[in-house]
Image: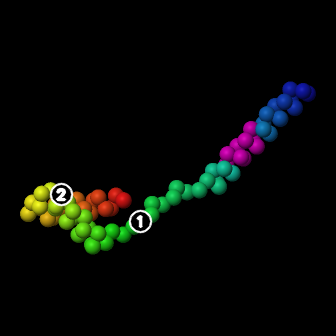
Amino acid sequence: MAAVKKTTAKTTTAKKTQAKKTAKKATTKAPAKKKVTKVTEEQIRARAYEIYEESGSQSGLDVDHWIQAEKELSKK
């Protein structure tokens, strides 16, 4: 009879442990969403101009500077 009680106790403990795991999964918060900040045209223009000056004021690369500025600002 003692063997029957031990098996029942183990089964009960295993069920409780599983119930706790299930409850924990249910209450786990979803990952926080990234806060999206809108980059304005003014910010892009200012950064593109900075890049233009940093590159030695090379003309003809305005689109490249604009795209680089967009990429840099969107990462922040």
Toward which corner of the image does residue 71 lie, by quadrant?
A: bottom left
Q: Is residue 46 visible?
A: yes
Apparent side of residue 74 relative to residue 51 in the rendered image (left or right)? right
User: Which label sits on residue 21?
Assistant: none
Q: Which residues are magenta?
A: 14-22
Residue positioned 51% across, 58% down in the render: 32
Q: Determine the main secondary structure of the stretch shown in magenta.
A: helix
Q: Which residue is mark 1?
A: 36
Q: Earlier in the sequence, mark 2 or mark 1?
A: 1
* Residue 15 shown in magenta: yes
Q: Position of residue 53 (x, y in %)?
A: 16, 61
Q: Position of residue 40 (x, y in %)?
A: 31, 72
Q: Is residue 68 left or right of residue 58?
A: right
Q: 37 left or right of 44?
A: right
Given contact means CB atoms under 8 Å apart, are the residues at marks 2 and 1 in contact? no
Q: Which residue is mark 2?
A: 54
- Tell me where residue 30 appears, x and y as whole percent: 55, 57
The front one of 50 and 7 is 50
Visible residue check, residue 67: no
Q: Is residue 28 above or below residue 73?
A: above
Instruction: Give whichever of 22, 27 is nearer the camera.
Output: 27
Image quadrant occupied by the C terminus: bottom left
